[in-house]
Amino acid sequence: MRAYLVSSDGGPDAIQRVERPDPMPGPGAVRVAMRAASLNYRDKMVALGGYPRNDSRPVVPLSDGAGVVEAVGEGVTEFAVGDRVVNCFFRDWVAGEPDDAIMRTAHGGGIDGVLAERVVFPERALLPIPGDLSFEEAACLPCAAVTAWQSLFVKGGLTAGQSVLCLGTGGVSVFALQLAKAAGATVFITSSSDEKLERARELGADGTVNYKATPDWHKEVRKLTDGRGVDHVVEVGGPGTLAKSMRASALNGRIGLIGVLTGADGEVNPLPCVFERLSIHGIYVGSREMFADMNRHIAANGIRPVIDRTFPFDDAIAAYKHLQSGAHFGKVVVTIDAD
Ligand SMILES: NC(=O)c1ccc[n+]([C@@H]2O[C@H](COP(=O)([O-])OP(=O)(O)OC[C@H]3O[C@@H](n4cnc5c(N)ncnc54)[C@H](OP(=O)(O)O)[C@@H]3O)[C@@H](O)[C@H]2O)c1
């Protein structure tokens, strides 16, 4: 079968195409003929090296995929040949609080990922595709959507009528917008592009701010909330945005600390956390249980992942470059068609 392999820290251009024998499912395992995979910002970090805890070499890249069950090992009870499935980001995080060994089982980083024609998973690392989502749509869910879900609903405890701020229009933020709107929240979103903000409004955003044209976007968010601030922030920016996210937050607000799009270094004054009683939660994707809960929300509300562009398997490196350009809105997908 065809697969890609990250063997160095040379970035997307150094990712190799390889031929590997078809993997065979052992007891409790399932072989999936992959049909689609999606990219996340972290896949660029994996290709460049230094991704915390999950930086094995060589490793098949990408954490998020969907496909069809092709073969099942002895003792498999949840899946049968022909089932449409999506994989979990962490192979071993089923439920509860994870330990360090579990945290090292991130697909496409700590262990082999899904940019291959066939992948064997333990059945605990798979879920049925929710509703009538296509393989391409389902492949968007494991990292970006589950991260947004954990931030807003598991750690954040979001309820109808609350307000949410999403930063930028990448994979995590667009899912946060969709999941929160479906739960009856009022959602604000920022972007560097007015055109992307218009698309966000079409998806239901109640208020938008161009963070390039309005560098003090936190003040604009406060204005949009009549001076109160938002109940939840999905914080993907890191040191360059965190101080403003705190200032955009309402008393008792909750911030899901997710990403470092502005880089990992920088000083942040923590005092607003004290005087505004803010809670900041570190989020690292989520468990299979969270994924399953989210899938019920997706199916019940008819949420469809937003795919910016799809690339064929042979052009997977072009998909990395498209993600790297920042031109996308939502998710970038690679289609896979096993021989
Ligand atoms: N902790 C976790 O479990 C977890 C899971 C998933 C992702 N992450 C992290 O979360 C971040 C986002 O990941 P992703 O996959 O959603 O990325 P992505 O799809 O590549 O999103 C990139 C988008 O972020 C926006 N952006 C860039 N700089 C910004 C800034 N200064 N302020 C506001 N928005 C900015 C831009 O949106 P516009 O073009 O609209 O300006 C850009 O297009 C990354 O740092 C990633 O590593 C963490």
Image: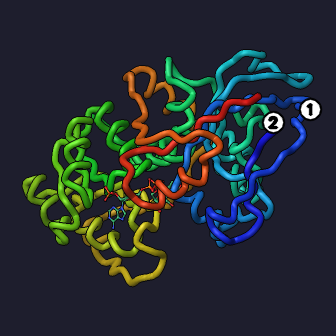
Tell me the residue that label 2 is attached to: 120
Q: Is residue 134 left or right of residue 197?
A: right
Residue 287 in percent (x, y) is at 61, 43
Badge 1: few (under 14), some or many (20 or more) residues near its Cα, within 10 Å?
A: some
Q: Are marks 2 and 1 in contact (CB under 8 Å)?
A: yes
In the image, ligand 1 is in what quadrant? bottom left
Under mark 1, the amino acid is: Gly
Q: Residue at x 34, y 51 (%)?
A: 169
Q: Is residue 229 left or right of residue 30?
A: left
Q: Residue at x 56, y 36 (%)?
A: 139
Quadrant placement of the N terminus: top right
| Disc 2 element | strand
Tell me the residue that label 1 is attached to: 26
Q: Nearer the viewer, residue 149 or 336?
A: 336
Marking on residue 291: none
In this rendering, is residue 4 above or below 238? Answer: above
Q: Nearer the viewer, residue 33 or 90?
A: 33
